[in-house]
Image: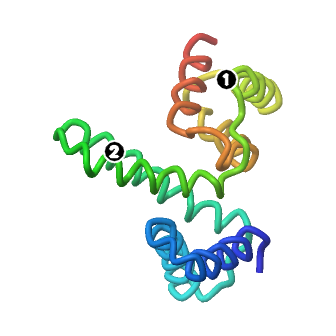
Amino acid sequence: MGDLKDKIGADLKQAMRDKDAPRLEIIRMIWAGIQRREVDERITLDDSQTLAVVEKLVKQARDSIEQFTQGGRDDLVKHESAQLAVLQTYLPEPLSDDEIASLIDQTIADTGASGIKEMGKVIGKLKPKLQGRADMGKVSAQIKQKLAAS
C-alpha cells in the first residue's frame, strides 16, 4: 500500500473521530474512488495511481465550480471550493510556470520533437514528472505552442 493511500485512510479515521462532516464527506469520496478502481482493475493502487484518482476528483471539482459560478449558485460554489481545498492537501507541491516551461523545453530537446505530430512523445515523457504538480491541459497547450513555433 502506498504512503498517500495510507495517509488518506488515516485522515478518514481522524475525520470520523473529530466528527468533521465536511472533511469526512470528501475523504470518503476519495476512498470510494480508490476502492472502486482497485476492485474494477483487481489491483492495489500505488502512490501514482492513487494520485490519479485524487487528480480526477480535483478536475471534477474545478469543473463543478466553473459550472456553478456560471449558474449563479454561490452556495454550491462555496461547498465545492471547500471540497477542492481538502483534495488539494493530497496533491504534491505545484510547480511554478518557469519550472514547467523549463521542463517542457528540456523534454522537447531530449526527445528531438520538431513538430505537432511528435507532441504525444513529449507529453508521454513529461506526464510522470508533472503528475499532480501541474494542470496537464495548460501544459499540453504550452507544448503545442512551442512545437508549432519550431
Quadrant including the C terminus = top right
Q: Nearer the viewer, residue 139 or 82?
A: 82
> Residue 143 vs residue 28: left or right?
right
Q: Secondary structure at mark 1?
A: helix
Q: Which mark is residue 3?
A: none
Residue position marked by numbered label 2 in the rendering: 65
The extreme top residue here reads 149
Classify 60 as above or below 144.
below
Callout 2 amino acid: Ile
Q: Which numbered mark, 1 or 2, is in the foreground of this view?
A: 2
Asked whether the residues under the numbered discs 1 and 2 touch, taking CB atoms below 8 Å apart as contact, a structural biologist would say: no
Q: What residue is shown at x 41% (from left), y 45% (from top)?
A: 62
Q: What residue is shown at x 62% (from left), y 33% (from top)?
A: 118
Residue position marked by numbered label 1 in the rendering: 97
Q: Position of residue 91 (x, y in %)?
A: 66, 52
Q: Secondary structure at mark 2?
A: helix
**Mark 1 → mark 2, Cα distance in angstroms:** 23 Å
Q: Position of residue 106 (x, y in %)?
A: 80, 26
Q: Residues within 10 Å of mark 1 (few under 14, many from 20)?
A: few
Quadrant including the N terminus = bottom right
Q: Position of residue 4 (x, y in %)?
A: 73, 68
Q: Which quadrant holds residue 68?
A: top left
